[in-house]
Image (tube, rainbow, N blue to C red):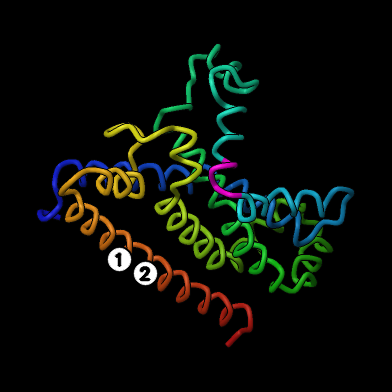
Amino acid sequence: MGWLGPAELEALRLSLRVSFWATLVTLPFGIFVAYALARWRFPGRQLLNGLVHLPLILPPVVTGYLLLLTFGIQGPLGKLLAELGIVVAFRWTGAALAAGIMAFPLMVRAIRLSIEAVDPKLEQAGATLGASRPFVFATVTLPMILPGVIAGAILAFAKAMGEFGATITFVSNIPGQTQTLPSAVYAFLQVPGGENAATRLVVVSIIIAMGALLLSEYVGRRAAERVSGS
């Protein structure tokens, strides 16, 4: 990465950090929500499904503004967190929150499709042997959907790396603190002579995105082969 300047490297490092934590923190919730949507029938299921996929439909700037209203210093949750000494608005943690929310629908969808491909009779067989539902999930379901979980995590990571609208609205574009790859590209394009730096970051973004998509496709294919028994 010697061809990247200090500011570009800092944006890349921050993007990797934000994407890693956005994926890691949302993954347990993604598995739970995907399982609930795939296996359970309960009042409000369609509403939950709509809320999960809402970030895909809303303009990212709207999502960022809603995050600012909710988690800003004067927001209901932001004020509560501030009393505990936790501030996410205009911090890298806020960038991770925004990126995680925007990537969450892709993660849930990939994991849900993997769960739906598993024959429920396999889970029922474990239950008839007296195993608890969490034990059946951990020993039967999770090993079978693990490739799908990995694929969902990879897609979420790639989406988090490319998130711009919600992030810049919620945490602004502060170099070294909240300036991720997309924000850095935008910033470089606003100054004379910044096109070369922006182009280098675009190349890095394309490489990361294509690598993530190819890896996700490979893992997804392996998951389908594993479930089908071939």
Residue 81, above or below 136:
above
Give whichever of 175, 40 is nearer the camera. 175
Give whichever of 81, 51 is nearer the camera. 51
Which residue appears at 40% of the width and 52% of the height? 161
**Is residue 195 one of those drawn in magenta?**
no
Q: Which residue is mark 2?
A: 210
Amino acid type at image mark 1: Ile
Which residue appears at 76% of the width and 49% of the height? 48
Which residue appears at 84% of the width and 63% of the height? 128
Circles 1 and 2: CB atoms closer than 8 Å: yes
Q: Quadrant of the C terminus?
A: bottom right
Residue 6, above or below 91:
below
Which label sits on residue 99? none
> Is 138 on the left or on the right of 61, as rendered?
right
* Image label count: 2
Q: Which residue is mark 1?
A: 207
Alpha carbons under labels 1 and 2: distance apart: 5 Å
The secondary element bearing badge 2 is classed as helix
Instruction: Looking at this view, name the residue that lies furthest to the left.
Output: 2
The region drawn magenta spans 59-63
The secondary element bearing badge 1 is classed as helix
